[in-house]
Image (tube, rainbow, N blue to C red):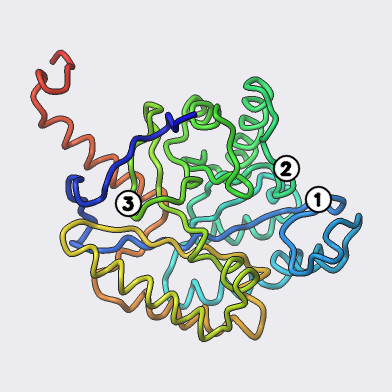
Amino acid sequence: MDNQLFPYSPIPERPPITWPGGARVAFYLALNIEHYQVDKPSTSIFGGTAGLAPDPLNYGWRDYGARVGIWRMLESLDRHGIRASALVNSDVCRHYPQIVQAGLARDWAWIAHGRDNSTFQAGMDREEERAYLTEVVETIEAATGHRPQGWLGPALTETFETPSLLAELGLGYTLDWTNDDQPYELAVPGMCSVPYSIEMNDVTLFVSKSYTGPEFLQAVRDQLDQLYADAAGSGRVMALCVHPFSVNQPFRHKYLDQALEYIAGHEGVWLATSDEIAEAYRAQRGAAAATVPAATTGVAR
């Protein structure tokens, strides 16, 4: 079947996007904070044991993020004045409340990221998925005092019903569709896509592509420099997608810190959250729509 969620839209043909303060690039730090079930396979650094239950090697590697890596991450974010966009499994609220409290103290944005990173929606019918998504959103809201506005599926997974169900729950954007450098509207009323990256992502770079720390740092710099150049006439979005069990390993951490220093010190960069980017985009699109004559839009005024 053809994709019904969004049409093809070549980037040179779109109305220009502007960011606060005249920034060219809106940057957000996509901080994945995840819980994994001990008896299910998931993201692994060594495939030889990934199918075992339990799998101490790979489970322990992932668990390092919540126990150690996240606290190293906080030091860098604080140093460079960057608020995280926390992509949080709802089970994190129950298992790691200290992380939630640390994020609340820093005014993070809270993005729903499923129940845990071992459970995907694939195979759920609409009512089952509605109940699942409702539980996820309400659990995060109860723990943080903020109803999530955005969604990232575990392993970026959705069903064909996910966007409309998210809209029913009051969410306004998804990060799952990694096909653009700008936000864009989805066919579901009230929903848009905000750029996320599977390439500018520590698991991809370090685990799949075996990047060294210096290569990671150079990739981040190159990404920002190219987007900055592209944005001469219309704003772009840069997402740096990280997992504390990967990028905050001791021998890698300083390269993340240097990357954040480069981003925070770069001219024309708006240090934002994914919530703020979605809000700024919607405000512009709403203002643009309000200036279109009723005869063009087909809407009575």
Question: Circles 1 and 2: CB distance less than 8 Å?
Answer: yes
Answer with mark 3 or mark 2, whichever residue precedes in sequence. 2
Within 10 Å of disc 2 (Cα), the crowding (few <14, some 14-19, many 20+) is some
Answer with mark 1 or mark 3, whichever residue precedes in sequence. 1
Question: Circles 1 and 3: CB distance less than 8 Å?
Answer: no
Give the image location of residue 123, x and y in percent.
70, 30
- Residue 300 lies left or right of residue 210; in this view the side is left
Give the image location of residue 84, x and y in percent.
49, 61
Give the image location of residue 9, x and y in percent.
29, 42
Within 10 Å of disc 1 (Cα), the crowding (few <14, some 14-19, many 20+) is some
- In space, the residues marked 1 and 2 are separated at their CA atoms by 9 Å
Q: Quadrant of the C terminus?
A: top left
Answer with mark 1 or mark 2, whichever residue precedes in sequence. 1
Q: Secondary structure at mark 1?
A: loop
> Up-down: is 126 above or below 192?
above
> Up-down: is 255 above or below 83?
below
Circle on res. 119:
2
Q: Which kind of residue does numbered mark 2 sit on?
A: Thr
Q: Residue furthest top?
A: 300
Within 10 Å of disc 3 (Cα), the crowding (few <14, some 14-19, many 20+) is many
- In space, the residues marked 3 and 2 are separated at their CA atoms by 29 Å
Tag 1 residue: 37
- Residue 171 lies left or right of residue 140; in this view the side is left
- In space, the residues marked 1 and 3 are separated at their CA atoms by 34 Å
Residue plotted at (52% across, 83% down): 255
> Up-down: is 195 above or below 164?
below
Give the image location of residue 42, x and y in percent.
75, 55
Where, by quadrant of the figure, is residue 263 drawn? Answer: bottom left
Tag 3 residue: 182
